[in-house]
Image: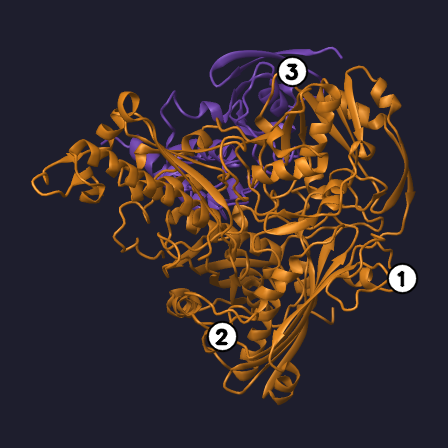
Amino acid sequence: MSKIHVTTTINGDESEFLCTPGETLLDALRNRLGLTGSKEGCGSGDCGACTVVMDGQMVCSCLVLAAEAQGTTIDTVEGVAEGSELHPVQQKFLERGALQCGFCTPGFIVASKALLDHNPDPSETEIRYWLAGNLCRCTGYDKIVRAVQDAAAELRQERTPA
Amino acid sequence: MNAPESKRAFRYVGTRPVRPDGVEKVTGKAIYGPDYQAANMLHGAILRSPHAHARVRSIDTKKAEALTGVKAVVTGADFPTTEHIIMAVGESSSDLVHLSRNCMAQDKVLYDGHAVAAVAATSDEIAREALDLIEVDYEVLPHVLGIEEALADDAPVLHDDVFTKGVNPTPDKPSNAAMRVEMGKGDPEKAMADADVTVSGRYTCEAVHQGYIEPHACVSAWDSDGQVRIWASSQGHFAVRSLTAKILLISEADIRVTPLEIGGGFGGKTTIYLEPVATLLSKKSGRPVRLAMSRAEVFRASGPAPGAVIDITMGANKDGMITAVDMEFKYHAGAYPAITAHSGASSALSHYTIENSRVIGWEVLCNRPGTKAYRAPGAPQSIYAVECALDEIAEKLGMDKIEIRLKNAARPGDPNIMGIPQGEIGYVECLEAARDHPHWSAPLGPNQGRGIAGGAWGNYGGPSTAQVSIAEDGTVLVTTGSPDIGGSRAAMAMMAAETLQVPYEKVRVAIADTSSIGYSMVTGGSRTTFATGLAVTNASNEIIENLKGRAANIWEVNASEVAWGEEGAVCLAEGKTDETMSLAALAARTTFMVGAIGAESSVNPGGFLPGVGVHICDTEVDPETGHAKVVRYTAIQDVGQPIHPDYVEGQMQGGAVQGIGWALNEAYLYNDKGCLDNPGFLDYRMPVASDVPMIDTVMVEKFNPGHPYGIKGVGEVPIVPPLGAVACSVSEAAGVRMRDLPLTPDRVHEAMHPDD
């Protein structure tokens, strides 16, 4: 089967790969680029463990064809921290114990960061509905929602000049 | 509202530090089951039965084998013949032959999704293409899915060699009734006849999946000398080793299983599905082989918790004392015999003192995947019926629902249904905490109802091994054989830090492969923090004794004249009381002077205590649609001494929400052919963030005297009370008693509007 050549920007770096026509972006990220932080929980867009941001839009990478990534900019969980400095969302997930097994965590981190990029002061209800596309079976969501609230507060403080 | 931090004089135990494996998990670096790759690895895929029940007449794999890129094909014929021996599987047990045939069908397929053949190829696409080329000739047989249907005289019988266990004499005709258990005491018939008030009802709940987000996955590599390496995510890699070894007739020392990070299990990953298949594919191809399930495969072919039909009659005197319980429940076993009915029966009444009781449980075979452990296996179903019946009694008597529970609550020293006295359980304290919680007295809004339910689970100890060693700079390495499924590395590090009196950050925790540490039972049964934590504590204490001896040698005093504290070794000998030697200074002598500092502890502790909890649930029902939404929820639990309270609360919150899903949404939908119509997260609806409120927690800290840090298992109890709490809450909100779970909008609507 002939392969498609794709050039894209991933976490700020120019990146290229070959993929089959039916291959998902998630499979290309995981199997061709070694970016296994994005997880496959369902392969049908229902669990959000594979969430990435593509040209500023949050997507389930299992529902995007790898070939569609041509010319786009993609941010994955591997790009959320700046070098070795954790993003406040990541730091608050740790401080709040907002993960147990951690398998859904990359998707939640990407989705939560996308929420706060878009809405710096979300209500609890807004957080819950924004994250309704991400399944977590371990935590019951309580500590996740609190971690996002904490991260939002910290980011607002950072943005406010002293 | 959380209980205040521990008031005991602990430095680390009871605090909330960041877990040692946290950063790799929030940055996407942690390697889970489906992430692992071996060099030169092949990709496997499994062909699964499209029929619920069929005889496999023949399998033709020639075309698949001829496809370019296919390196191996395996069917049931490649599995060695094994004997009918009972193997421990997590907290449960299974017949080895059934375990083997569940990995790959031999003569019959017993459920939609049962594995019949597997392929390994150079790519995933080729492997899947090859599956389409395998020709299986099935003789489709009648199937049966429901509990009552499976017990009917004319029901299709799944196994011709299963004769009801627990019935005397053993029947001479095979049937789907795999097992019967009966427990009880006193004279329930007489007590029921004498009761001032009785209630009776039939309660049902559906089979539900554990719903871990990580599908099963493994890589296996068989070498020509017969040694096998397996990388897998599971709740117990020693179980993966022993089950794979027994099924494939390999010695256990020849299998080395490396635990990968595990993406949830809840009991469902205490067994094996893929590892023997991947190992046979690797043996045939000579290359490492990966097998990974899709979500549909997880739903179709991995273990649910049993659904249940429960008939209960409860009698009480007019003061609210429960005088008699007579209950009979029937659980789905699925395709193979299970023993969940046993724990269902022993748990059912364990949190109450009831003089006269009879509890009968059945395991019923049907054409669904074999049931597996799911958090307190067997307890949520039977206790759901008990708590709802108690609710009905309270209503009949006009009694407060906490008062009636307090009146009947089991207290330390009270005998359980098997006559064994209860240990230091805190059910009364939990009920009092519920009564005192602002939730219990808060006003309800329109169309809202409040439910309360208790629950218990026996918990477990079990074998664990831990090693503790001191690096040359005095930092501490803890190694266990217990996979970390929800933060247990943090708890291990905290107990080592507390015992050795070193800073938490100086302790790092690793989970070793099966060839690198002694046997440890699965992470399950609420046992890891308790039992593996005891092994870590024991090994740490042994190190302290060793270090005291080293310091004594240096100071030329007796070891009994050396104490251990935050500063390290402290000399107590007369004239030398100024002498101290830090752990770092003692460790620095490792290289040249006195050798390595380390200790190993293997334990199989008793001293574990049951967990008990009480949940309060408010729901609001939309009278137009019948949709019930949880609007407030409080989980109260006797947790003993919490080591890391965040992860204790996390167990309570996660278990509560799983229970809410069981009560409101989750169910398998089988079509008339016996095939699963909802093998995905869209139609198998687990709770999402917008479905639930914050889950308030109250940790009742009743120290376990049988453990150095007072630990009680906490992981399983939280799924026990929600079924009753939610059902009673919806019943109150809807104004009609709801006895069949899940409480889907159509059911609730129909109950509210019976004349529509």
Q: Residue at x 29, y 41 (%)?
A: B545
Question: Is the Cβ of the residue at disc 1 closer than 8 Å to that at disc 2?
Answer: no
Residue name at image x 63 percent, y 82 percent: B187
Residue B118: which quarter of the image?
A: top right
Distance between mark 2 and mark 3 Cα atoms:
63 Å
Q: Earlier in the sequence, mark 2 or mark 3?
A: 3
Check disc 2 and give the amino acid type.
Lys
User: Disc 3 versus disc 1: distance between alpha carbons?
Assistant: 52 Å
Mark 2 vs mark 3: in front? 3
Mark 1 neighbour class, 10 Å CA radius: few under 14, some 14 to 19, many 20 or more: few
Furthest residue in direction left, as rendered:
B575
What residue is shown at x 76% (from left), y 46% (from top)?
A: B676
Instruction: In the picture, one chain is purple; tell me its letter.
Output: A
Q: Which chain is orange?
A: B
Amino acid type assigned to the residue bearing label 3 in the image: Asn
Relative vertical location of residue B394 with respect to residue B60 in this rendering, above or below: below
| Closer-to-camera residue (B283/B294) | B283
> Label 3: which residue?
B40
Q: Which residue is mark 2?
A: B401
